[in-house]
Image (cartoon, helix red, strand yellow):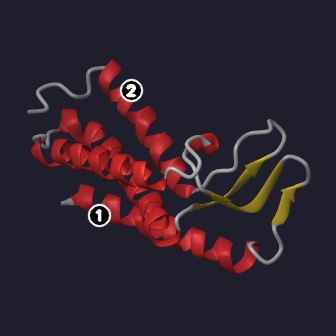
Amino acid sequence: MIFFAIISLTIIIDQIAKNLAIKYLQPIGTYPLIEDFFHLTYAENIGAAFSILQGKQVFLVATTIVFTTILLYYLIKTKTKKSTLLFKTSLSLIIGGAIGNLIDRINLSYVIDFFDFRYINFAIFNTADSFVVVGTILLAYAIIFGKTDNIF
């Protein structure tokens, strides 16, 4: 199924990016791509988005497993039609991103972040976070504009 390929690909891209961050960024801390605007910065996040729920790894792991299981259920049970392709693609991106960060939480007890937009003083984030955000935007679009009709 193509959607499981999307999930697998997002996980692979995320884990490769994080391994590159460990290898090249961890020793130096940060590397400015555009000085004072966008850096690649190695960070270990023991919380969730924007570092909320710091130190609550068991809760974050459990929540991710439950949430991902529910999304997988919808992905499997939804009939694949032209009208549901965007819906299922969005779920696949969210699931892949969630699993990418879950792997870090289980193996390391933190998530590796490295995208650092300093110009707007935004939280440092990673590829898995990006997949979740893009998937969520696509999901919202699919729901708002009726790209989910007859999903069951």
The residue identified by callout 2 is 141
Residue 34 placed where, x, y %? Answer: 86, 54
Residue 136 placed where, x, y %? Answer: 42, 36
| Mark identifier at residue 118 | none
Which residue appears at 38% of the width and 59% of the height?
99
Residue 15 placed where, x, y %? Answer: 50, 70
Three-letter residue code for mark 1: Ala
Query: Nearest the camera: 9 or 44?
Result: 44
SS type, badge 1: helix
Q: Looking at the rendering, which quadrant does residue 71 occupy?
A: top left
The residue identified by callout 1 is 5
Q: Is residue 50 left or right of residue 100?
A: right
Identify the image quadrant of the C terminus: top left
Among the two numbered marks 2 and 1 on one chain, the one whose residue lies closer to the N terminus? 1
Query: Nearest the camera: 76 or 100?
Result: 100
Identify the image quadrant of the N terminus: bottom left
Q: Looking at the rendering, which quadrant does residue 43 occupy?
A: bottom right
Q: Residue furthest right?
A: 35
Which residue appears at 16% of the width and 46% of the height?
73
For label 2, count other residues whose C-alpha is less than 10 Å away and answer few (under 14), some (14-19) or many (20+): some
Which residue appears at 90% of the width and 48% of the height?
36
- CB under 8 Å between callouts 2 and 1? no
Q: Indicate whether 137 appears above or below 10.
A: above
Q: Indicate whether 75 appears above or below 150.
A: below
SS type, badge 2: helix
Three-letter residue code for mark 2: Tyr
Query: Nearest the camera: 26 or 80?
Result: 26
Residue 82 placed where, x, y %? Answer: 19, 38
Q: Is residue 69 left or right of residue 35?
A: left
Q: Looking at the rendering, which quadrant does residue 7 occupy?
A: bottom left
Marks 2 and 1, how far apart at CA: 22 Å
